[in-house]
Image (spheres, rainbow, N blue to C red):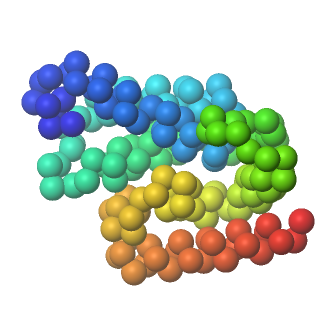
Amino acid sequence: MLKVVNGQIEQLGLLFERYHVRLYNFYLRQVCDQDLSRDLTQNTFERVLKYKHTYRADMPFKAWFFQIARNVKADHYKKQKEVKSLDDIPYERNLRLSEEDHSIEKNEQLRLLQEALQRLPEDKREILIMSQLEEMEYAQIAEIYQITENLARVRVHRALKALKEVFYKH
């Protein structure tokens, strides 16, 4: 990212190759819409280029990058002037977020877990995706949300507890 900041714009292609699939999956797990996820991914990289001057070398790139991603999603829904409820979102049940072959039982558990994740409030769903699926450290999450690391731990713990409750209700 420092090379992009210093004018080597072509280096953004390398960042795209490293992060576009993760970013797409990050969005897909939240919005359950492949086309929207592609659009948000593209918009995020456009915004990275536009706001490259805000990147600080002392900040982890991943935290800065996912803060932009969160802002892109929030701005999308602000433009819509109506955040859709989960009932309005077409849930694509056959999403394959990885190429691994799973047994039928494991696929069913994964499907149920994805559905439970979608039932969570957006803030809890987002922090779980960051901590569990994107494997971000609490320090990175704290940086993104501009909170303390301890508060990040508490929020992740609460989100996991809420997911467990939703998962076992169904």
Q: Nearer the viewer, residue 54 or 60?
A: 60
Q: Classify the position of the C terminus by image quarter.
A: bottom right
Q: Is residue 166 left or right of residue 75?
A: right
Image-quadrant location for residue 120? bottom right
In front of the other: 104 or 91: 104
Toward the viewer: 68 or 78? Answer: 68
Is 16 on the left or on the right of 28, as rendered? left
Give the residue displayed 56% in from the left and 77% down from the top: 157
Q: Residue furthest right?
A: 170
Count of all numbered marks drawn on residues in the image: 0
Counting from the top left corner in percent of width and height, residue 95 is at: 73, 36
Residue at horizontal 78 percent and vertical 53 percent from the top: 106
Q: Residue at x 38, y 27 (%)?
A: 17
Q: Position of residue 85 (x, y in %)?
A: 77, 49
Q: On the rendered image, what quadrant is the N terminus found in?
A: top left
Outermost residue to the left: 6
Q: Is residue 57 visible?
A: yes
Q: Is residue 132 above or below residue 16?
A: below
Q: Could you tell whether 10 is left or right of 102 in the image?
A: left
Q: Is residue 85 visible?
A: no
Vertical order, 59 against 83 (above or below): below
Compared to residue 158, the image places residue 5 above or below, namely above
Picture coordinates of residue 46 (x, y %)? 37, 26
Q: Which residue appears at 40% of the width and 36% of the height?
A: 19
148 on left or right of 117? left
